[in-house]
Amino acid sequence: MTKYIKGRGAQLNTPDPYAKFSRGLLRPDQADLEDGCLRNSQYQMVYPKSIVNEVKSPDVGMEFSINPYQGCEHGCVYCYARNTHPYWGFSAGLDFESKIMVKSNAPDLLHHHLSNPGWKARPIVLSGNTDCYQPAESKFKLTRGLLKIFHDFRHPVGVITKNALIQRDTDILTELSKDNLVKVILSVTTLDEDLRQKLEPRTSSIKKRLQTIAHLAKEGIPVAVMVAPIIPGINDHEVMEIVRICSLMGARTAGYTIVRLNGDVQTIFSDWLSLSFPDRKEKVLSKISSCHGGQVNDSRFGKRMRGEGKIAEIIRDQFKLAVAKYMNAEPPVVLNTELYEKYRSPQLLIDF
């Protein structure tokens, strides 16, 4: 009988599509488990040549991103970023959340990038692929280093995270906010802590995430909530309440996406359903496919994030109603791009 691995989202490793010989689906040997948990994550220092990525997708709301870590210990079972891990010789499954590459020179690369006289200030988003405040950040502090560089250059930055660790950097975020140089998006997938522990096991608890929204709002840092992903049959009934509670905590605006299971995520998520919710596995997969033209995967720009069909329309209408009822219809935050030219050759003004 397959034992559920505590503290992890994926319960197996999918095969490496680039390997000469496929080993098939692999579950960890019991010798690799300690009290039902996978042994601690492994960190590998890497030194990329660049750190700012151009985002060519028209429906993700960002032009440029930085991901200081490859792989993510949060272990969200639905994470689309899993499919990038095989490029590095690892599996999209358990490897993605336990074998983390640390881009040690990320702050230096950002400094070099922002020093380029040809660069024009445009918001750069921290995360976008893997979470910049995942547990590794408490050890390596790369995100904090990046925020310092953004402040030195007075360059606009966005942050997307599910981790309360962002509160550690309130000092820098507050300074950035004074010049309208930062906005934060907190992802809240569910208000059910039991579900959170299975769905995204190493993220911050729901209580800590809501407290983080309140903390940032109190400090005057613009914060929005992303209800994502909405998974029909799992958390779609929570849309109204998530928006209501997050609004009470201080979130100014809200967004959402509907889950899609591209690449290896389909196998990983289906296996997770078999172990976590075997009684509703087929129903959930059927509902997801009904939102994506009969497939659980979807790569169509303009449709992949929000879906289509009756279930997707119901979710859209619920979300629109929730925002209209509980949010104050504030306009999107437009970050300041005017200060960067003045501070292109910065001197460190504040010692953090």
Image: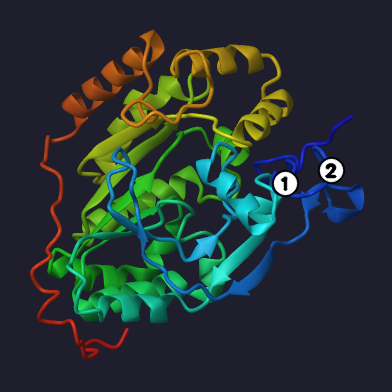
Q: Which mark is residue 16?
A: 1
State the image coordinates of residue 78 (x, y, percent, origin top left): 55, 36
Residue corresponding to mark 2: 23
Three-letter amino acid code of the residue under disc 2: Arg
State the image coordinates of residue 119 (x, y, percent, origin top left): 21, 71
Spatial separation of the CA atoms under disc 1 and disc 2: 8 Å
**Nearest the eye: 44 or 229:** 44
Q: Is residue 33 above or below residue 189?
A: below
Q: Residues within 10 Å of mark 2 (few under 14, many from 20)?
A: few
Residue plotted at (54% across, 33% down): 262
Image quarter for residue 301?
Answer: top left
Q: Is residue 221 visible?
A: yes
Q: Is residue 7 visible?
A: no
Q: Which comes before the other along the chain, label 1 or label 2?
A: 1
Q: Tell me if 292 is positioned left or right of 71 in this view.
A: left
The quadrant the C terminus occupies is bottom left
The quadrant the N terminus occupies is top right
What element does badge 1 sit on? loop
State the image coordinates of residue 235 (x, y, percent, origin top left): 48, 25
State the image coordinates of residue 225 (x, y, percent, origin top left): 31, 42
Image quarter for residue 172?
Answer: bottom left
Three-letter amino acid code of the residue under disc 1: Asp
Q: Which mark is residue 227?
A: none
Q: Tell me if 332 is positioned left or right of 12 in this view.
A: left
**Nearest the eye: 144 or 25:** 25
**Tags 1 and 2 touching, CB below 8 Å:** yes
**Nearest the eye: 201 or 122:** 122
Residue plotted at (31% across, 68% down): 170
**Nearest the eye: 125 or 113:** 113
Q: Residues within 10 Å of mark 1 (few under 14, many from 20)?
A: many
Q: Tell me if 263 is positioned left or right of 4 in this view.
A: left
What element does badge 2 sit on? loop
